[in-house]
Amino acid sequence: MMRIGIDMGGTKIEGIALAENGEELFRIRIKTPRNDYDATIKAISGVVNDIEENTNQKGTVGIGIPGAISPQTGLIKNANSTWLIGRDFKHDLATALFREIRLANDANCLAVSESVDGAGAGAKVVFAIILGTGCGGGIAIDQKVHAGSLSIAGEWGHTTLGWMSPEEYPGEECYCGKRGCLETFVSGKGFEAEYERKTGIRISALEIIKEIEQGNDNAEKVLRTYENRLARGIATIANFLDPDVLVLGGGMSNVTRIYQNLPALIVDWVFGNEFNTPIRPAKHGDSSGVRGAAWLW
């Protein structure tokens, strides 16, 4: 049976249809109707309908969101797309689509996608890191989501930056209400904020990388600081989970030099001072999350 995957992000909703063998049959992308819950339900339903009309097939539906379902209430929690918080999103969407759906955190979808046929294929434990507007983490074990009893397994972005310097402590306030979360340091927005602190100028992460390529010393120092912080964050993952493969996704994962620089930086912070875990970019790139959502079935 055809598998339909939906990746619901803060700015876009992407849909994909996969055949039984993983072949892509159809893809669609639309803007997310931000801050409008009913319009979001309608938009996702429309994407599923468009996929089925264009493929002339019915499919199972899996959805990745930047949040999770609370095991206690059944309602959405911890969502960057804050208009979903406190809503019975899974039930409402299943009702709109007239079928059962499966839903997972978007970082978990990335982990599943990459463990099935991506950068972590063949590995037992894959930890996926999203370094985008926010900072997420997800775990796949034997190609299945490991969400945990509280549905927060892998929420690495909301642990604190390890081994903070006096200048870093206590950290900026995170949207979750706490200070010092890794998300405020190693997300794309965290990278931009560090550049602004150093220069007084706010520009995009992509523009900062271009400045580095043009020999800008301030931009180079900001990226070195970023790499050091990311290394400390990954060392924490190695210390508590010790995955077989680390897969990076999101905009900052496209900065190719981090794959060369991180291992030597991480080893200084890992317990025992040994580190040889592969760190790889997501094989399916920006499509990995939506593919993982399809693979929830």
Image: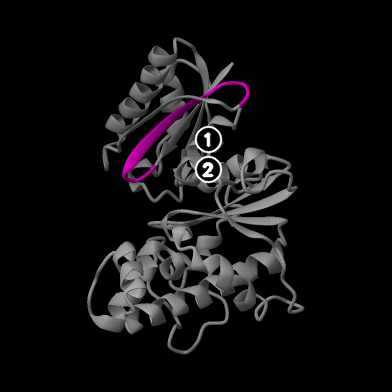
As for residue 14 lying within the magenta part, the answer is yes
Could you tell me which secondary element the residue under label 2 belongs to? loop
Q: Quadrant of the C terminus?
A: top right
Name the residue that disc number 1 marks.
Answer: 291
Q: Are marks 1 and 2 in contact (CB under 8 Å)?
A: yes
Name the residue that disc number 2 marks.
Answer: 284
Could you tell me which secondary element the residue under label 1 belongs to? helix
Residue 293 appears in the figure: yes
On screen, residue 158 versus residue 239, left or right, reads left
Image coordinates for residue 291, horizontal then vertical, percent: 53, 35
Residue 75 appears in the figure: no
Numbered circles on residues, count: 2
Q: In the current view of this chain or complex, which residue is farthest to the left?
A: 201
Q: Quadrant of the N terminus?
A: top right
Task: Give the number of the mark in front: 1 or 2.
Answer: 2
Image coordinates for residue 76, horizontal then vertical, percent: 45, 42
As for residue 79 lying within the magenta part, the answer is no
Image coordinates for residue 147, horizontal then vertical, percent: 62, 45
Residue interval drawn in magenta: 9-21
Instruction: Give, as a three-letter code, the residue at label 2.
Output: His
Rendered position, 36 above or below 79: above
The residue depicted at 34 percent of the width and 84 percent of the height is 217
Image coordinates for residue 2, horizontal then vertical, percent: 55, 18
On screen, residue 132 versus residue 161, left or right, reads left
On screen, residue 17 versus residue 28, left or right, reads right
Mark 1 and mark 2: span between their CA atoms?
Answer: 8 Å
The residue depicted at 45 percent of the width and 51 percent of the height is 78
The residue depicted at 57 percent of the width and 69 percent of the height is 260
Instruction: Give, as a three-letter code, the residue at label 1.
Output: Arg
Q: In the current view of this chain or complex, which residue is farthest to the bottom?
A: 166
Rendered position, 82 above or below 166: above
